[in-house]
Amino acid sequence: MSKLRTRKVLGMRDSIPTPALLGDEQGEMLVLGWGSTYCAITSAVEELHKDGVRVFSLHLRHFRPLSKGLDASFSQLRSLHVAEMNPCQLARILRSEYPQHDFLDYSKVQRQLFRTSELVRKIRAILEPSPGHGRRASRRSTSSRTTTCACSRAAGTTRCSTACRA
């Protein structure tokens, strides 16, 4: 019975339209979101466009199944970022469906919505590396060492999406 349901659900994939990308035609970065992140992401992308920053946004409405044209959209861009108001639910789904792409996530679980200024700051930190950009070891706990760079620390992630790929 579950196999039949899975086939039916995946069969609907063709009827779900691919979401439109909002932003510059030659963008470098895609910021994905769903639900309550729509306004903050859209406002942040519009504000960055006014300053000449090349970035796209995409708002997903369907998770199961995801629309068919997403892989082509993801392949065009250098960096894919997921902003969500929970602990990485969308990022996990995207990583499992599209393992060939590297999704970096910004999750916020503080009972407060993202602010436009907060997203603008994080996007700028990734696209415009700071003077201290480059690999640097930092201690997370007494037992393990991780390698991060200044731009990833500024963006609040553990991996760098810019040229150094820390």
Image (cartoon, grey):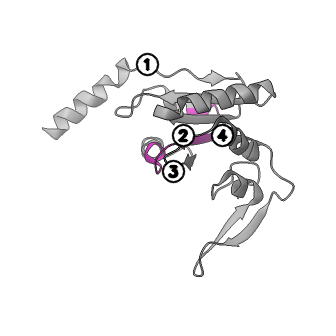
Per the image, the residue denoted by label 4 is: 119
Q: CA distance from mark 4 to mark 1?
A: 27 Å
**Dot 1: within a 10 Å radius of its alpha carbon, few (fewer than 14), some, or many (20 or more) residues?**
few
Residue 69: image location, x then y, percent: 48, 25
**Range drawn in magenta:** 74-92
Q: Amino acid at mark 2?
A: Leu
Q: CA distance from mark 1 to mark 2?
A: 27 Å
Which residue is identified by label 1? 17
Residue 34 lies, in percent from the top left, at: 48, 33
Q: Which residue is mark 3?
A: 110
Residue appearing at x 60%, y 36% in the figure: 31
Looking at this view, name the residue that lies furthest to the left.
Answer: 1
Give the side of residue 73 with respect to residue 134, left or right: left
Q: Secondary structure beneath disc 4?
A: helix
The residue lying at 51 percent from left, 32 percent from top is: 71
Front of the two marks 1 and 2: 2
Point out the tag, 1 or 2, that comes first from the N-terminus.
1
Could you tell me residue 41's position as x and y percent?
60, 32
Mark 2 residue element: loop
Task: Say which residue label 2 marks.
Answer: 113
Q: Nearer the viewer, mark 4 or mark 1?
A: 4
Q: Is residue 80 magenta?
A: yes
Q: Earlier in the sequence, mark 4 or mark 1?
A: 1
The CA distance from mark 1 to mark 3 is: 32 Å
What's the amino acid at mark 3? Gln
Q: Earlier in the sequence, mark 4 or mark 3?
A: 3
Disc 4 to disc 2, C-alpha distance = 11 Å
Check disc 3: other Cα within 10 Å, few if <14, some if 14-19, many if 20+: few
